[in-house]
Image (cartoon, helix red, strand yellow):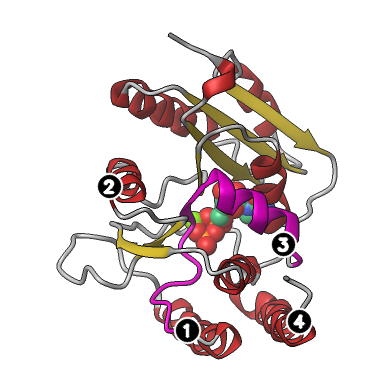
Amino acid sequence: MFNANDIFLSVIIPAFNEEKRVRDNTRAVEQKCDAMRLNYEIILVNDGSVDSTLSRMQECAGSRIKVLSYEKNRGKGFAVRHGMLHAAGRYRLFMDADLSTSLDAMDKFLEAMRQDDYDMIIGDRKSRPGDHTVKQPWHRRFLGKGFIVLSRWCVGKKIKDFTCGFKMFNRKAADIIFKKQQILNWAFDTDLIAIALIHDLRIGEIPVTWNHHHDSAVRPMRNVFTSLAGLLKIKWNILQGVYR
Ligand code: UDP
Ligand code: MG
């Protein structure tokens, strides 16, 4: 049944200092993919962790679970791109190592990819106020709101949720977007969306159930400036035709 040349779904998981959860969470994704009965690969990308993340990943490695690793911490955007450029799946999904997004979304995303003919689907954490999710702290919501406003100005479209760590691409979209990607730090999600829009790719937005984890690697104040610089760079790139 397993044919490496005809992988249906690639799941890319970037990880920086995730020794506490990467093994168990990879197992959970593996079980989910097994239950979905599809031909898949899971690509774990160790983004220069300084803890035992790489060893924990290697304990999971197998025919379906691949481990990519490099020494220096280069940022989530770099890790995702690295995984995507090594992926073979007809559909390619990246998700956070803390599994903030409920894995039920995998079925919904694949279904929508096929039924609605999307090239890319963005998880949307905003459209489900009734769900029993753990709320983000106020300062993250505040900075998040500012990021959305600026990102909408950047790409010229009212995307609901730019930064959700759960996005799926078909092969065509992944090939275009990750070869053109310029931003590797915290504004990278907006970069991916800007490229998709410029190439007239069909973007879907699907609500997901999200749980905020307190031990996040995001240090809001320190990253505000890098994010802002990233967004300005994206606007500049759009105006200069860099993504064409
Ligand atoms: N991550 C990464 N490189 C980094 C920082 C984060 O690969 O330099 C990964 C991290 O391990 C996780 C994902 O990116 O899988 C999202 O990080 P985190 O959960 O800390 O972000 P948040 O949920 O707070 O946005
Ligand atoms: Mg997280």
Say which mark, if any, is on residue 157.
Answer: 1
Q: Which residues lie in the magenta part?
A: 157-182
Within 10 Å of disc 1 (Cα), the crowding (few <14, some 14-19, many 20+) is few
Q: Position of residue 232 (x, y in %)?
A: 72, 86
Q: Nearer the viewer, residue 23 or 187?
A: 187
Which mark is first along the chain, 4 or 2?
2
Amino acid type, callout 3? Gln
Q: Is residue 175 magenta?
A: yes
Say which mark, if any, is on residue 181.
Answer: 3
**Residue on which the image places disc 4:** 233
Image marks 1 and 3: residues in contact by CB distance under 8 Å:
no
Say which mark, if any, is on residue 64.
Answer: none
**Residue on which the image places disc 2:** 108
Q: Position of residue 54 (x, y in %)?
A: 70, 30
Marks 2 and 4 sit apart, C-alpha to C-alpha, by 33 Å
Q: Is mark 3 within 8 Å of ligand 1?
A: no
Within 10 Å of disc 4 (Cα), the crowding (few <14, some 14-19, many 20+) is some
Residue at x 71%, y 82% (from the top left corner):
238
Within 10 Å of disc 3 (Cα), the crowding (few <14, some 14-19, many 20+) is many
SS label for mark 4: helix
Image marks 3 and 4: residues in contact by CB distance under 8 Å:
no
Marks 1 and 3 sit apart, C-alpha to C-alpha, by 19 Å
